[in-house]
Image (cartoon, rainbow, N blue to C red):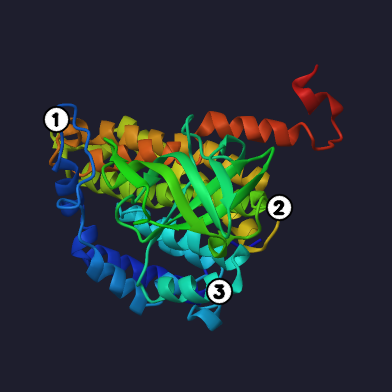
Amino acid sequence: MNFAFSDEQELLRRTARDVFADAASLSIAQVRALNRSGADGDGATHFSVATDLDDVALWRQMAELGFLGLPFAAAHGGSDGSFMDLAVILEELGRAVGPPAYMQTVALCGMTIAASGPDALRADWLQAIVEGRVRLSAAIAEEDGIEEVSAVRMHVRRDGDDFVLDGIKRHVEEAGRVDAYLVATGSTADGITLFLVDSGAPGITLRPQRTTAGGARADIHFDAVRVPASRIVGEESRGETALQGLLQRGAVAACLDMVGAGEAVLEMAVAYAAERVQFGKRIGSFQAVQHHASNMAVDVDASRLITYQAAWKLSEGLDAAMEVAMAKAWTGEAYRRVCTLGHQIFGGIGLMREHDMHLFLRRSRRDDLLFGDAPVHLDRLAAILDTVETPWPQLRGYAP
């Protein structure tokens, strides 16, 4: 396995970094302004159309550069690329503290439609995604707030040629800013069915959430929402595999976001340590600060390696359950350690709202929880290891 970027991917990375660095809608200054908008006493924010980032120009530019069509077939206007190509963009968005629209639209919903959707849905929606005309978001989590197959219980019933959806989806990213939701319904007992539901369908009500990281997140209430059978992504009651693929891509996408953000925090902290003078010396000359930077570098590089291993297996269509669990369990905690040490290097100034560090720290809380935090994935990893035959039987079940 060679995780080094190809020449094409390296060019894609440089282009993406330049675009996101120059885009006003992704500038850290505007992200900070968004976090201030609607803030209450505890610093949490809520979604408001009037105060959200206006990234229409950037979205159009991403479409023109082919970013939105990377993993899709040329027949739908795409580039016939892979998830590894997509990983390059997702990492660069993490560096830029970018909104999750790209992850949701392309990596989660778009790739699910491409892999499992009927021809009519693929023809209509993938072309629209590639051209930047629509945005999508996945609606998975319910009462317990966990995004996993076994947690889906949303009620769905057939009524003639339509299906009727009732229930609540929690913590939906980009709520109110997308054209449709990819909604998981049913249960593991009765079968999972995925629907592409128009965001403006009668019976849909949004309840915006206060968030630490900012952005457009809400609970969505479905009250007898009618969806035609033609909007099923995959097969009725047989969507578990498609949903599992979406969740694995989501977990790796969150890891890629943290890898990019962690690299940005490390670079910021090292640059500050090289110029900040205290006690007559640059603080970067102090051994404790050097150790902090070294530990941050270890966490960032280890996160990148384990994340790209999972991304590569997903890209190759291999069983990546173990690698995804390891990547998400490790990277979430590693990124929080990077942010903590970054704050220690910056000292008091890093705690000021005017400083960039708190934005990355807020992001670490969101990304760590997305698609399951470390304990969730450690449990999954333990279950996987318990089924793997090893030459050391005593390791199975942790028995002596």
Disc 2 to disc 1, C-alpha distance:
54 Å
The foreground one among 396 and 155 is: 155
Graded by Cα atoms within 10 Å as few (under 14), some (14 to 19) or many (20 or more), the crowding at tag 1 reads few
Q: Which mark is residue 319?
A: 2
| 116 on left or right of 209 | right
- Under mark 3, the amino acid is Ala
Question: Which residue is under mark 3?
Answer: 120
First in sequence, mark 2 or 1: give its number. 1
Q: Is residue 181 visible?
A: yes
Q: Residue at x 34, y 57 (%)?
A: 200
Q: Residue at x 49, y 59 (%)?
A: 109
Q: Which mark is residue 201?
A: none
| Residue 220 spot, x, y in % from top left | 38, 43
| 129 on left or right of 74 | left
| Residue 68 spot, x, y in % from top left | 42, 70
The residue furthest top is: 400
| Residue 294 spot, x, y in % from top left | 41, 40
- Under mark 2, the amino acid is Asp
Q: Is residue 301 visible?
A: no
Q: Residue at x 45, y 41 (%)?
A: 370
Q: Where 393 sits versus 190, above or below?
A: above
